[in-house]
Image: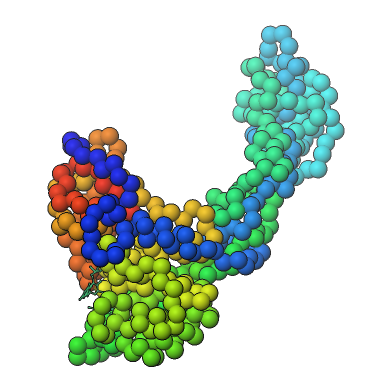
Amino acid sequence: MTVLTRIEEQGCGCGTADHPGDLISIDEAVAQILRNAGHVRESEEVALAGARGRTLAEPIAAIAAAPPFDNAAMDGFALNTACLVGPGPWRLPVVTRIPAGQRGSEPLPMGAAAQIFTGALMPDGADAVVMQENVRRTENTIIVSHEILAGAHVRRKGEDMAAGDMVVPAGRTLTGRDIAACAAAGRATVCVRRRLRVALVVTGDEVNSPGRTLSSGGIWDVNTPMLSALIPAPEIELVDVLGFRDNRAALRQQLSALADEVDLIVTTGGISVGEEDHVKPALSDLGLDMVFSGVAIKPGKPVSYGRLGQAHWLGLPGNPLSAFVTWQLFGTVLCQSLAGNSASSPDRRHVVLSQELRHSYGRCEVRLAEISGFDSTGREIVRFDKTTHSGRVARLPAADGVILIPSEVEVLPEGALVEFQPFRD
Ligand SMILES: Nc1nc2c(c(=O)[nH]1)N[C@H]1C(S)=C(S)[C@@H](COP(=O)(O)OP(=O)(O)OC[C@H]3O[C@@H](n4cnc5c(N)ncnc54)[C@H](O)[C@@H]3O)O[C@H]1N2
Ligand code: MOO
């Protein structure tokens, strides 16, 4: 496959194109979220074993050296290599036995060996371990027939961590790998940011809960199950899931109550320009401080973000694919930032197009794509849909993420590089 074009610009390119009205680019929207979303102040101490996915509020330093003492890396015999002089083989008496966990042992006399087990404390006077498979053993002696280097099969005190070494920085969302390092650093608990409190509000007179009989003019509610599944995480508690009718006064009352209870209100629907779109008017009545209202993105153009008192508001469009994509692009970044994660920028990489791509000049399009393999130089190849339909979700299960098609692009050849953002399930 020949690569013809490289897109040099970072981000989606929306910012450089003439898009309608006051719409901002995807990257500008992410930047505005990061500028406006501080993190929750409160923190709590939690057991290390239950801390996966929580965001570290304080750095973790090693309480003591790891390993805490010189110890054997193999089952075998500890000896001092200085006694292996002249031509071998060498016969050494086995004078003691040191299992792992034994507190200490007598110093090893020069010319003698100690039977030792993996993890056991090295005796003073020994500088190497020879594996049991590499000696001949008689009842109480061993015969060593090849040279042993000083330090062989010995794990040195502090070779993994010195006391006081920084092991995991603050602001990191803890993984199983971090937890392993914290445990080796001697920590039983860690100080993490408290969980975010999030409310989901799904609006629309036409939406029907799955499982009921579909009303005339009604559609199945996709956004409630979809976002109820996507939002919760170890650092995020979905405290309320509410369905509201398209009524400004009722919305005003409920949103006002929620703003006092949660850190973030996520709404879907009701944010476009129609007379039945009541979310923005209701929030405006309540004194919403709008940060942005609309992004030059397809799908998801009406996505909006603002502050309502102490709470944050993210307005996702009603169309389910638009809601899914805008949650992936903006909601995840907002939550990571609020949770105190210091690495909350989007996770993107360049991939190679499997075929020619066509796009209508205008908004930056985020089109469903799946990684289909690798080219001869090891770069990932993506297959992608021909078009984007904001109300269709049947293709979502096969998609691994989206490709970002810059607004000014009309055709890209097979082999061109484009940005790809993977979905977080
Ligand atoms: N005159 C204009 N009309 C529209 C514009 C525009 O710029 N001018 N923008 C269009 C775009 S783009 C989008 S996206 C939608 C977004 O509108 P809203 O966020 O106000 O969403 P609704 O109107 O409430 O719903 C849109 C669509 O999605 C369906 N929907 C809503 N909720 C659900 C749900 N929970 N599950 C499944 N489907 C849902 C709803 O029935 C509508 O079909 O506005 C365009 N209009
Ligand atoms: O921006 Mo809308 O989400 O295309 O349908």
Q: Is 340 left, or right, of 411 in this rendering?
A: right
Q: Where is residue 392, by image quadrant?
A: bottom left
Q: Residue furthest top?
A: 86
Residue at left offset 30%, top offset 73%: 317
- Relative to the observer, which residue lies in front, 148 or 412? 412
Q: How is the image coloured?
A: rainbow
Residue at left offset 26%, top offset 47%: 418
- Relative to the observer, which residue lies in front, 139 or 224? 224
Q: Determine if residue 48 is in view.
A: no
Q: Position of residue 368 (x, y in %)?
A: 25, 59
Q: Position of residue 249 (x, y in %)?
A: 38, 91
Give the position of the N terminus as an image quadrant: top left
Ligand 1 quadrant? bottom left
Q: Is 172 left, or right, of 116 in this rendering?
A: left
Residue at left offset 62%, top offset 46%: 167
Say if 25 sits above or below 5 in the image.
below
Q: Where is residue 100, by image quadrant?
A: top right
